Amino acid sequence: MSASVTSTRSRATGRVTLADVARAAGVSPITVSRALRGERAVAPSLVVRVQAAAAKLGYVPDPAARALASSHSSHVAVLIPMLSNALFVDVLEAVQRTLRPAGYQTLIGITHYDPVEEESLLREHLQHRPAGMLVTGFERSEPTRALIAGSGVPCVHLMETSPAPDVYSVGLSQAQAGAAMTRHLLQRGRQRIAFAAAQLDPRTLQRLEGWRSALAEAGLYDPTLEWLNPAPSSLALGGRMFEQIIGQTPAIDAIFFCNDDLAQGALLAALRLGVDVPGRIAVAGFNDLTGSDQMQPTLTTVRTPRNEIGNAAATMLLALMRGQPLPTASVDVGYELVIRAST
């Protein structure tokens, strides 16, 4: 690298600049910018020359500077509760697969189900002038709602749907899915169906409402059947909850766990304790996570289409960012009861 190029690097960062590439290629900075963006107005021979100079110098475009100069960003802010839950990993991967070919990168924020942390993350992301936002659900603080509404940034809500006008969402009815699984257990002749939940996030509580409504319709609702624990969901917790629930009097004949990891832990505990599933007690889960079809017995669960949610939400956001019309503001991807041997 020549001394002249080295001396003209950004004094503040030491980075190779657009001007450095322009000097090395013998063209103007605007030509470099257009060539690297793939604009057709630049002659192919110049594009080759610019690309060669950029590669030789190790030039990396500055997306923040580009966004500032053009009022357009290549970043999308994505706020999800956690990465330890495979549910959100699947959604995020689908989002990435849809956005990256369209030229967008994701700024991921993990909220840990904490409204204060979500507000802080959103403020930080908005400083980067994102082109769009994907946020999880609708439960959040009023300051965060105001940030989203006042940002002017297109926003799509994940995992839940809303009939509100001008609110864009892709998800499913958690309450309907919870009620459907409860009715399945009732149809199998179960009378005392416990609902066992951890984390107690908004979507878990919506499943709880679905369970309550289905039991109330059958005249079988009993508040002592609710086993709610705010601790993070895990196999270990599911095993402990199972041991507690099977000791309840009158006896429980089915347990509907709010998430598959809890239900998987319960099935492992049943094997260890010699409890017959489903003979003595039926076990059901939610989300159809990896391994549920390999349990002994295989786990009955609700399959949630995470890939479809991520893809549809990202596709909806792309249309909003491009100013394209949408056929609907709310997409319900539905759910599927997966009936296996545990019920």
Image (cartoon, rainbow, N blue to C red):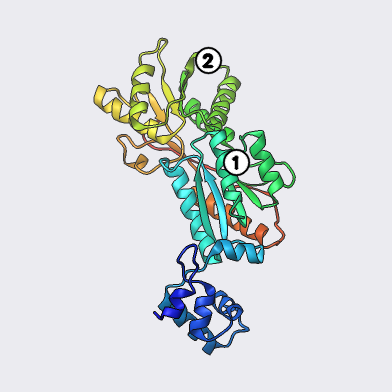
- Residue 264, image x, y percentages: 35, 33
Gap in Å between the C-alphas at discs 1 and 2? 26 Å
Q: With 291 as the anchor, is 139 left or right in this view? A: right
- Residue 212, image x, y percentages: 56, 23
**Can residue 232 be seen from the camera position used here?**
yes
* Image height of 240 relative to 9, above or below: above
The local secondary structure at tag 2 comes to helix
* Image height of 338 relative to 178, above or below: below
Q: Residue furthest right?
A: 165
Q: Residue sitting at 57 percent across and 49 percent down?
A: 125
Q: Amino acid at mark 2?
A: Pro
Count of numbered marks: 2
- Residue 185, image x, y percentages: 47, 28
Q: Residue sitting at 61 percent across and 82 percent down?
A: 40
* Image height of 187 relative to 337, above or below: above
Label 1 Cα neighbours within 10 Å, binned few <14 / some 14-19 / many ≥20 = many
**Along the line of sight, which residue is nearer the eye, 35 or 112?**
35
Q: Which residue is mark 1?
A: 160
**Along the line of sight, which residue is nearer the eye, 235 or 132?**
132
Query: Which corner quadrant of the image does residue 235 belong to?
Result: top left
Q: Looking at the rendered structure, which numbered label has been put on residue 203?
A: none
**Can residue 305 be seen from the camera position used here?**
no
Q: Which residue is mark 2?
A: 223
Between tags 1 and 2, which lies in front?
A: 1
- Residue 293, image x, y percentages: 35, 42
Q: Earlier in the sequence, mark 1 or mark 2?
A: 1
Quarter the N terminus occupies:
bottom left
Q: Amino acid at mark 1?
A: Glu
Residues tagged 1 and 2 counted as in contact (Cβ below 8 A): no
